Amino acid sequence: MWKRLVTLGLATALALCACAQSAGSPQRSGPVTLRIGVADLPPSGVPWSGVGAPGQYVWSSVFDALTVVGPDGAVRGALAESWTARDPRTWDFKLRPGVTFSNGERVDAAAVVQTIRFLLSPAGRAQFAAHVSNYAFLTGASELDPATVEVTSSQANPLVPNALSIVYIVPPRSFQAQGVAGFAAHPVGTGPFTVSRWGADGIVLEKRGAGSWRGSPRVDEVRFVPLRDPAARAQALQSGQVDVANGLDPDQLDGLRRQGMTVVNGARGAIMSLALITNRGGPLARPDVRQALNYAVDRDAMARNLYRGLSRGAVWPVQGVHGYSAGRAPIPHDPSRARQLLAAAGYPTGFSITAEVVVGQFPADAEIYQAMAADLKQVGVTVNLVTVDFATQWLPKFSGRARWAGDAFGLSWNAAPLMDGIRPFNFFGCQYAAQYSCDPVAQPMIDRVNDTFEPAARDAALRELLDYNMRNPPAILLVESRELWAARDTVHGLSVAAFNVPLEKVTATA
C-alpha cells in the first residue's frame, strides 16, 4: 500500500512538472519554475476558506490584507501603511497609495469596505464561519475618504490589527460578477503572483512583475504539487521532480541534509491536539474525564521519539505567542492518576470514542495520533481513529456545514494570525458558530480577554483563562507543531513563519 501511494504521488508530480528529467539531475531552461511538493492544496481559491495550512501557503502569494504578522509576531503594514485607535472600539486604517489588483481594479477604501462588509454579513458568516470566528468581534467598516477605512468592533479589543491580517481583500467588481463559486476557480488579488491554473491536481502561479507593491518575484512560476504521503514528497525532492517539499517527517531530515538539502525548522505558533466534543453529553462532557485523558498521554515521549527531539510536549501558548510563560509546564504523564480520575467519574473500565483526524499535514502526525491512542488504551480508553480529507470532510464539519460523526477530531491550536493565546479559545467557546464545546465557566473568561483593551488588565485576564484551561482542558494536548521543510541546493531564500512563505523572495536556479 505504501509503495502504491508513493508511486501515485510521483506520477502526479511528473504530470505537473514543467518537464520530465532524469532523476537527480534536472536540466531546466527558459522561465524559472519553483516546484513545491505539498501535503494538500487549499480547499478553494477564495482566501477565507480556512486559516493556516494548507491555504496560507498559496493565498499569501496571491492576496494581501491590511496588515501582516511578521516572523517575530509583530504586526506590520500591508495594504494599510498605518493605523490608529480613535477609541477602544474604532480604528482608522490609512491605505497604501497606488495599489491595484492584478485585473486593474484599484485598491481603495470602497474595495476594502466591501470585502469586510461581505464577510461580516449573514451570508459571509454562514459560508466562512471558521474564518470569521477569528474576528467575530468586528462590527463593520466605513469609508472615511478614498484612502482611509474605519473599522469598528463590539469589544475594546487591541488585536483588531492582528486579526485583519487574514482578511484578504478581493476586487469588488470581479467578486460580484463571478460570485463565490466563480471566484474560487479564478481568484484575483494584489499579491506578487497571479493564478494561471487552479485544479484539484495542482495550482500554478505566475509572477505578476512590477504590478505588485511587494516587488517583482525572483522566479517566473510556482507550481504546487499535491503529494499526500511524506515519503512521496521526500522522494520527489531527492529525484529533482520538486525543488521544495513541506510537511516532512522528522526522521527524513538527516538523510536530506546529507544529500545537500537545506532544512527549515520553524515555529508555527501552534500545537497538535485532539479536540473533544463536549456538548453531546457522555464522558467527554466531564472536566475530570478530560483531565484523565491528558494525564494518560506521554507527550514528552512523542516529542523525543517521533519528532526526534525537534519539538516538545504541548502547553498553551507556546513560546513566541503572547501569553507564553516559561513557568507553565505541560500536563505531566501520570497514568495512575488518569485511572483514579476515570474510576471516580464512574468509568473504571474506560470507554470508547471515535476521532476524525487528518494525517500528512504536520510532521509525524499519523504516528503521534497512534501513540496517543496507545497511551489511552493503557488506561482503558479505546480511540478509533478515522482518517478524513481536510477539504471535503474536516473543513465542512469544523465550519458547521456538516456534522462530526465521531466524538473528537484533530485540531491545531494555532495562534496565527493573532499570535495571541486567546485565538483557539474562540473556537472552543459557546459563541462559535459551529459549536462543539461550551464551558459556562470559561466563556466569561474568554469574553473578558476579548473585551479588555488596557494591556496589563488584559494580560491578567488571559493568565486566568490559561490557568483554568490547564485544570479543565477541552482537548487532549499533544506536541508543539513545527514547520519542517526542505529545499534543493538550487533554491535560496526560503523562509517559513506561521504558515506564511514569502515566495517572492525565493530564488531558484537550474
Image (cartoon, rainbow, N blue to C red):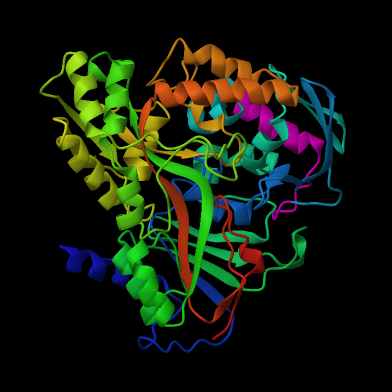
**Mainly helix, strand or loop, the magenta region?**
helix
Residue 504, compared with residue 259, is above or below; it is above
Q: Residue furthest left?
A: 349
Residue at 68% from the left image edge and 55% from the top image edge: 191
Identify the residue shown where x is 77% and y is 52%: 100
Task: Inspect the magenta stretch and tell me whether residue 323 lies in it.
Answer: no
- Identify whether 57 is placed above or below 315: below
Residue 438 at what x, y percent from top left? 41, 15
Closer to the camera in the image, 192 or 106: 192
Which residue ends up furthest to the right in the rendered image? 145
Name the quarter where the N terminus is drawn.
bottom left
Q: Quadrant of residue 192?
A: bottom right
In the rendered view, does 112 fall on the left or right side of 86? left
Q: Is residue 339 left or right of residue 502?
A: left
Foreground pick, 286 / 325: 325
Q: Is residue 364 visible?
A: yes
Q: Nearer the viewer, residue 462 or 192?
A: 462
**Residue 47 in the image, given as x and y percentages of width and height:** 56, 44
- Give coordinates of residue 451: x percent, y percent: 67, 17
Residue 392 appears at what percent x and percent y? 34, 41
Magenta span of residues: 101-120
Please name the residue shown 72% across and 51% down the image.
101
Nearest the eye: 280 or 263: 263
Q: In what quadrant of the picture does the C terminus appear?
A: bottom right
